[in-house]
Amino acid sequence: MEVAQLVLNGVMAGTVLAVPAIGLTAIFAVLRFTNFALASHMTIGAFAGFVANTTFGLPIVPSLATAFLVSGFFGWMSDEFVLRRLRASGFVTTAIGSIALTIALENFVRFGFGNQMRGYDLPLRRDWVIQGLRVSPQQVENLAIAVVVVALLFAFLALTRTGKAMRAVADNPMLASIKGINSDTVARLVSFIAMGLAGLGGMLTGLDTTIDPLVGFRTILSVFAAAVVGGLGSIPGAVVGALVVGIGEELSLLFLTPAYRTAVGFLAILLVLTLRPRGILGQRAY
């Protein structure tokens, strides 16, 4: 029963983890670098939703929309005025620049909100117990929201002209340009959507616990591990990788204390790079 409970918790956590992991892998697919500034945008989204929920009294769904829009806007701005200037210098320089950017943005949040833990304005509800398995209503709501968001994103990529343009740029930027697709416009849109997903994921993470300026920093390793395990550049792979990492982190509690659960992310990255460098679903497999 303990294993079943941990697997259930892992599925819940992995589904939420898939939201920012999709953002990270989408940026890699289109812009060809790993944007670690996603960590700070998770924090920005979490606090934007916090303000919308506790200061303006908005329900959770509008607060999540606020988190998406605010973090997406900051993501577009930071890429447009900081990272875009670095991309010509190569993958490594841009990735390092994104780390410096995330430190700056996290401190920006810290100056505005302080270091204390904060919680959303949520009703107190008892956990549900089904066949001996315990799950909180908030976990179920987070799962449902994450599933809807991922489904809408897949529909957007598969059915809309803009989504198809994004896929074309990810597959072959030169051919997409010949076909008349503006890769710069696509890059801006991807930055907005990906960082919006990061912010939404940051708030979903905080809804189940609490938030502080390091909420994104504590999660980024798991997000990166999910993207690598699934295959950097593969959006379905990010979902699969998130579930693998989420379940793996929970099952590790059978052997490790909670303080060492993040080691699962390191182990997952090491195993994938050793056994299957392209990840479970390979690179840019839509």
Image (cartoon, rainbow, N blue to C red):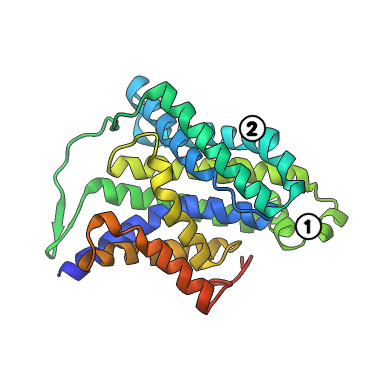
Relative placement, left or right, of 52 versus 108 is left
Q: Position of residue 151 (x, y in %)?
A: 49, 55
Viewer can see residue 154? yes
Q: How many tags in the picture?
A: 2
Determine the residue positioned at 31% across, 47% down. Answer: 141
Relative placement, left or right, of 252 versus 238 is left
83 or 232: nearer the viewer: 83
Relative placement, left or right, of 46 versus 97 is left
Three-letter code, disc 1: Pro
Q: Looking at the rendering, which quadrant does residue 254 occupy? A: bottom left
The residue wearing badge 2 is 77
Compute the Cα span from label 2 to label 1: 22 Å
Three-letter code, disc 2: Met
| The C terminus lies in quadrant | bottom right
Q: Are marks 2 and 1 in contact (CB under 8 Å)?
A: no
Determine the residue positioned at 41% across, 54% down. Answer: 17
Which mark identifies residue 173?
Answer: 1
